[in-house]
Every structure is written in C-alpha cells, then in structure tokens.
Image (cartoon, rainbow, N blue to C red):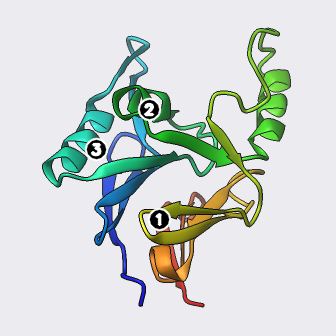
Amino acid sequence: MDSQPDVIGFYHVPTGSIQYVVTDPSTRRCIVVDPILDFDPRSGSTRTTSADGLLRYIEARELTLEWILDTHPHADHFSAAAYLKDRSGATTAIGERVKEVQRLWKTLYNLPDIVPTDGSQWDHLFANGERFTVGEMEGYALLSPGHTLCSDSFGRSSLLGGLLDVRVDLAAQRLKIDWLGE
C-alpha cells in the first residue's frame, strides 16, 4: 500500500503565492513546488529569505530534496529553483510548453537574443503525462493550461492522494483548491 505524502504549504504574503514541500514519509525524500525568490520592486534587488525558509524546513526534518518543480513561469514573482539547486543539487523541472511562453515573452518584452527560449534554465522539461518518482511514490506532470498557456499540475494517487489542483482565481481574488480523487 502506498503511503500518503506529507504536504505543507508556505504562504508568501507579498505575492499571495504558495510554495509547497511534498514528502514521501517512508523515505524522507521530498520535492519543492513553486519556490519564490523574493523581490523588492523599490530597490530592484532580490533576496533568498523564502527559499532559505524552505531549506531550513527540509534540513530540520532531515529530508532529502530530489526535485524542484515550477508549475509555470510566474509573472508575479521570480523562481528560486536555480538557487535551491545550487544549495541542494536537486533536479529542477517544468513542463515542456514553457518554451512557448518564453518565445511569447521574448517578443512581447523585446528581449535580446541572448535570452534563451529553449527551457534550458531547468534541468528537465516534462512532457504531458510524464511520470517521475519522489522516494517510493510515483507522480506525473499534467498539462493544465488556464492560468497560463503552459501551466502544469503535479499529482498521482500515490503522490498527492489524487490530483491536487491549486489555482488562484484572479477575478474573484481568492485561492481555489480542488481535490480530485481518482
């Protein structure tokens, strides 16, 4: 019988975003979903306060970080995936359709040619339905556009007890969490 994961969310007040740590309790291996690199718009500077909090949580519980997953490129905050990779050695990943959004943003924001649009900022680009493991639990990446063209949800009954679909309803200014069992 598959164990149920431990899932904890860390709310980031400045952006209204939630970062997650999902742990396989039997192996003490975990993933981080949507880590935030703090940004101060007044100074244009970044800080690693939120990401360091995730690392402290992981270290205090003697967990091993296996994956750092971004559900989509975020317009409201920067990802701390690269920082966490540098600190932990974990693999970074996002859905393969990120390349489409990168090309779109490059055109919209008139970005220079040195800005890559091939997803190379992450170690792995998930195909829709691709499976991965966290400890002994199996999960999958599911393309779930709506919030963005390339949004992905990550789930599986053995990973999240069904698909946990977390979305922000911007029009209603509220967090919507749907628990979709198998």
* Viewer-side residue, 123 vs 80: 123
Tell me: residue 134, above or below residue 84.
Answer: below
Q: Which residue is mark 2?
A: 85
Residue 20 in sight from this viewpoint: no
Give the label, 2 or 1, closer to the camera: 2
Q: In the figure, is residue 98 to the left or right of 47?
A: right
Q: In the figure, is residue 78 to the left or right of 8?
A: right
Measured in 3D between alpha carbons, the distance from the residue under mark 3 to the one under mark 1, in whole angstroms, is 24 Å
Residue drawn at point x = 34 percent, y = 28 percent: 87
* Amino acid at the residue labelled 2: Lys
Q: Which mark is residue 21?
A: none
Q: Residue 147's spot in the image, x, y percent?
A: 67, 56
Give the label, 3 or 1, closer to the camera: 3
Q: Which residue is mark 3?
A: 54
* Amino acid at the residue labelled 3: Leu
Secondary structure beneath dot 3 equals helix
Residue drawn at point x = 32 percent, y = 27 percent: 48
Callout 2 touching callout 1 (CB < 8 Å)? no
Label 2 Cα neighbours within 10 Å, binned few <14 / some 14-19 / many ≥20: some
Q: Which residue is mark 1?
A: 174
Secondary structure beneath dot 1 equals strand
Name the residue furthest left: 60
Q: In the figure, is residue 95 to the left or right of 44?
A: right
**Figure quadrant of residue 170:** bottom right
* Amino acid at the residue labelled 1: Arg
Residue drawn at point x = 47 percent, y = 65 percent: 174
Q: Residue 121's spot in the image, x, y percent?
A: 64, 28
